[in-house]
Amino acid sequence: MSGAADTDPDVLVVGAGPVGLCTAIELARRGVRVRIVDRRAEPRPGTRACTVWQRTLEVFDLMGLPVGDYLDSGVPYTHRAHHFAGLPPLVRPADQAGTPYPRPLLIGQRGTEEMLTRHLAGLGVRVERGLTAVAVEQGPARVTVTLTGADGGARTVRAGWVVGAQGPHSTVRDQTGASWEKKPCPGTQLLQIDARWTGPLPGDPAHCHLFLSEAGSLGTAPLPDGRHRFYAGVADPGPARTGDPDVAEVLDAVRRVSGVPGLAFHDGRFNWRVRLYNAVAGTYRVGRCLLAGDSAHTVMPVTAQGMNTGLQDAFNLGWKLAAVVRGRAPARLLDSYEAERRPVALALAERNARTYWGGVGPVPSFERLRAGLADATGTAAHTGLTLAYPDSPLSGGAAPEGEGPGPGARVPDAVLGAGAGHGRLFRLLGRGEWTLLALPEDPVDPAAAELAAKEAGAVARRAGIPVHTVTATGRGPAATVADPSGAVRGALGAASGALLLVRPDGYVAFRGGVRDGAALDRHLAGLPV
């Protein structure tokens, strides 16, 4: 059985937080023998990362996770209210169009881990707890990992590959020699608590709020249990002080930033102090060892992006590593993991450092910040929906003439016609393999459908990739997708037809016209797949 404790696996995942669990699921559902270990005897307590953005919800959907039940266990993130000292508040909806999950979700990290753990167990893999990785030694074909248990006894695992998802303190990263340079944010700290509150705090308590004043920044968010998350970035008068803050210290910071001295906390828990820094590993792969999540990048937890970025690491890495393990791709496919994901972490670290205000240094212009938010248009980057890999070695072809995903961009969801057998485009792509979509120049012309199917089919047969020809009726040569309303053509920006090669993670690897089969063939020939 995949993940059995007495076997040497294809892949050993070290760390059973959300990122490690997601990695293990992506491997196990593709038939890879995987084990996952964690040093903790029990899952880590606390709500910790509690914001799940729109693209992460799409990722969970594509993985086949029970997203509906997951949404029911959290709180919808409906609005963000910005309060700048001396200025009227600015309230903006959190909804984004073009996705089946228009709103983010607020749910404690423990809830996310429980959902992922249950799904992984359904795939035959159970987390092995109380095992700490203390040594990692690479050979030409295997990685030997020494684990110690709670009893102090050592055991050895020989895995084909190892994924380090342990968090910032990573044995896998340190023992493989990947560089790890911390860039601290001196003089400031983040104080956090989950609590019920009373007092004249402005705004709708069902909304998420961000306060900026000369004293620092303060965020609030409603949680499923009726408490609210409060997190305050303020000056750090005692940087040598260790340990979590008491309620009084957090409350004092929240009062100073919000300017509400009458605020009071009740039933507080999970008090937390963070000394802020950014760090990104110098490489995400050393031989047969790979890094993901906070082991690859630890960013200041002020924009609620850390866990979401790590989960997308896992989604990106899982299908690639599975293809290598199963002999369907050479190991150099894994080079595209770092090429795609490390720039994302670097950009996030830079953005966090640039935009964070923690009550230290020159006070930012609140008027300018508010005006910038009021004028902002388009899809916000923090949702993850705009994330793309146009410069990836896996991306090729040309951008669409109008709207629609170009090379390296996310494929949006769309409702398919009745009788299509899938219901939604995501169900078509969610099988976790490469897919070729052929959209004829004229969706109602049988000759156009035949041309598109022929152009795509010759390439697909050589590469072993399934083709789905999209027509208005769902009939025609190899036509499997009905799009009577044109919803798919519209979502893909293919009014004049297109060929789209879609990666297992739902991003476009190649885009061209329906007559660009030769160019698609050349692109496929150059891919490490």
Image: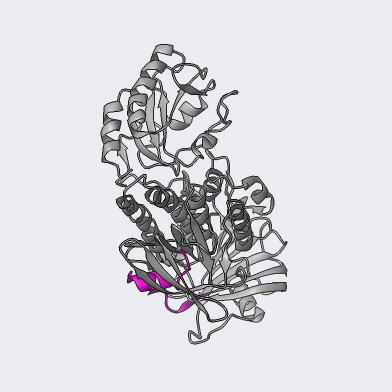
Nearer the observer, 160 or 384: 160
Q: Position of residue 490 (x, y in %)?
A: 47, 28
Any magenta on residue 422?
no
Nearer the observer, 289 or 492: 289
Any magenta on residue 185?
yes
Q: What residue is shown at x 45% (from left), y 41% (from top)?
A: 506
Residue 287 visible in the current orientation: yes
Location of residue 141 with respect to 102 vertically, above or below: below
Nearer the observer, 363 or 148: 148
Q: What residue is shown at x 43% (from left), y 48% (from top)?
A: 319
Image label count: 0
Horizontally, residue 192 falls left or right of residue 302, namely right
Range of the magenta residues? Answer: 164-189
Q: Position of residue 240 (x, y in %)?
A: 48, 87
Q: Position of residue 369 (x, y in %)?
A: 46, 58
Q: How is the image coloured?
A: one colour
Q: Position of residue 127 (x, y in %)?
A: 57, 63
- State which quadrant residue 113 falls in: bottom right
Q: What residue is shown at x 39% (from left), y 12% (from top)?
A: 447
Nearer the observer, 99 or 10: 10
Residue 277 visible in the current orientation: no
Horizontally, residue 464 falls left or right of residue 255, namely left
Location of residue 114 with respect to 426 vertically, above or below: below
Q: What residue is shown at x 48% (from left), y 62% (from top)?
A: 366
Quarter of the image with the C terminus in it: top left
Quarter of the image with the N terminus in it: bottom right
